[in-house]
Image: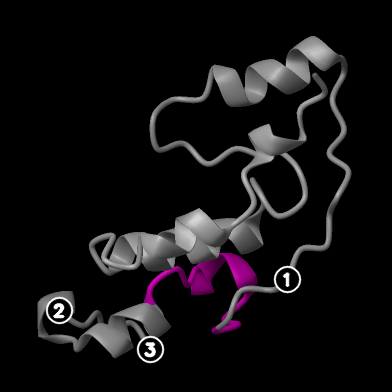
């Protein structure tokens, strides 16, 4: 199915359901697979920290667990696909900065 639907004609509920999908990258699978990665490898602590700190605005980078993986990005993209009207969800999702050592 190569047909693209004009998102301006979709109802809000439909936008939530279809936003965030990346069918081309997952071999035609409609819903994105769940990534269960809690450990992200890096060459050093500095390179790990810089991947997030040096990311361009809007760039999705691998960070940790439920933040910064394709599963979380699908949710972020779904929220963005609704024009951010579901921004309340961002307040209930874990924030990676809460887990920094003090």
Badge 1 marks a residue whose secondary structure is: loop
- Is 91 positioned to the left or the right of 82 in the image? right
Disc 2 versus disc 1: distance between alpha carbons?
Answer: 28 Å
Residue occupied by mark 3: 1
In magenta, the rendered stretch is 19-30
Residue occupied by mark 1: 34
Q: Earlier in the sequence, mark 3 or mark 1?
A: 3
Q: Residue at x 45, y 68 (%)?
A: 20
Badge 2 marks a residue whose secondary structure is: loop
> Can you say whether 17 is above or below 24 in the image?
below
Asked if the magenta segment contains residue 20, the reply would be yes
Q: Residues within 10 Å of mark 1 (few under 14, many from 20)?
A: few
From the top left corner, tell me how far across and down residue 92 is, in percent.
55, 60
Rendering quarter of residue 41: top right
From the top left corner, tell me how far across and down residue 56 is, in percent.
43, 25
> Can you say whether 11 is above or below 91 in the image?
below
The image quadrant where one finds the N terminus is bottom left
Residue occupied by mark 2: 6
């Amino acid at each position: 199915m190569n047909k693209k639907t004009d998102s301006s004609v979709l109802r809000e509920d439909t936008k939530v359901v279809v936003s965030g999908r990346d069918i081309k990258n997952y071999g035609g699978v409609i819903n994105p697979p769940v990534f269960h990665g809690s450990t992200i490898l890096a060459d050093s602590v500095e390179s790990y920290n810089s991947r997030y700190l040096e990311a361009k605005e809007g760039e999705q980078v691998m960070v940790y667990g439920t933040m910064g993986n394709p599963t979380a990005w699908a949710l972020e993209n779904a929220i963005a696909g609704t024009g951010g009207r579901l921004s309340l969800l961002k307040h209930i999702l874990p924030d990676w900065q809460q887990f920094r050592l003090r």
